[in-house]
Image: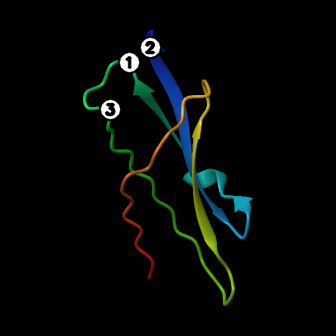
Amino acid sequence: MPRGLALGIIYIAKNGTILTSTRVLYEFGGGQTPGYITVPISGTIELASNDYIEVFVTNYTNSTNITANNMYLQIR
């Protein structure tokens, strides 16, 4: 990994259980301007009544906070 970049992980969980097939690794930092990146993530998840999903964004490299400013989630 180039100097200054950090590794992030985004994934979807169903009912609190991580769906590893939805996990996406991405690099961020390194002086990117203005500091925004776009990371696509997709998955097909069957939901029953009372099921719920969560989207997790983590910084795997260090303790720098990551803020998700926008998210587009499509559920059918």
Q: Observer-nearest residue: 22 or 27?
A: 27
Q: Position of residue 49 (x, y in %)?
A: 66, 90
- The reply to whether dot 2 and dot 1 touch (C-beta < 8 Å) is yes
Q: Observer-nearest residue: 35 or 13?
A: 35
Q: Residue furthest top?
A: 3
Q: Position of residue 6 (x, y in %)?
A: 50, 23
Residue type, mark 3 in image: Gly
- Residue pictured at 52% horizontal, 68% vertical: 44
Residue type, mark 1 in image: Gly
Which residue carries the number 2 mark?
4
> What quarter of the picture does the C terminus occupy?
bottom left
Q: Secondary structure at mark 1?
A: loop
- The reply to whether dot 1 and dot 3 touch (C-beta < 8 Å) is no
Earlier in the chain: of badge 2 and badge 1, it is: 2
Q: Secondary structure at mark 2?
A: loop
Which residue carries the number 1 mark?
30
Earlier in the chain: of badge 1 and badge 3, it is: 1
73 lies above or below 55 = below
Which residue carries the number 3 mark?
35
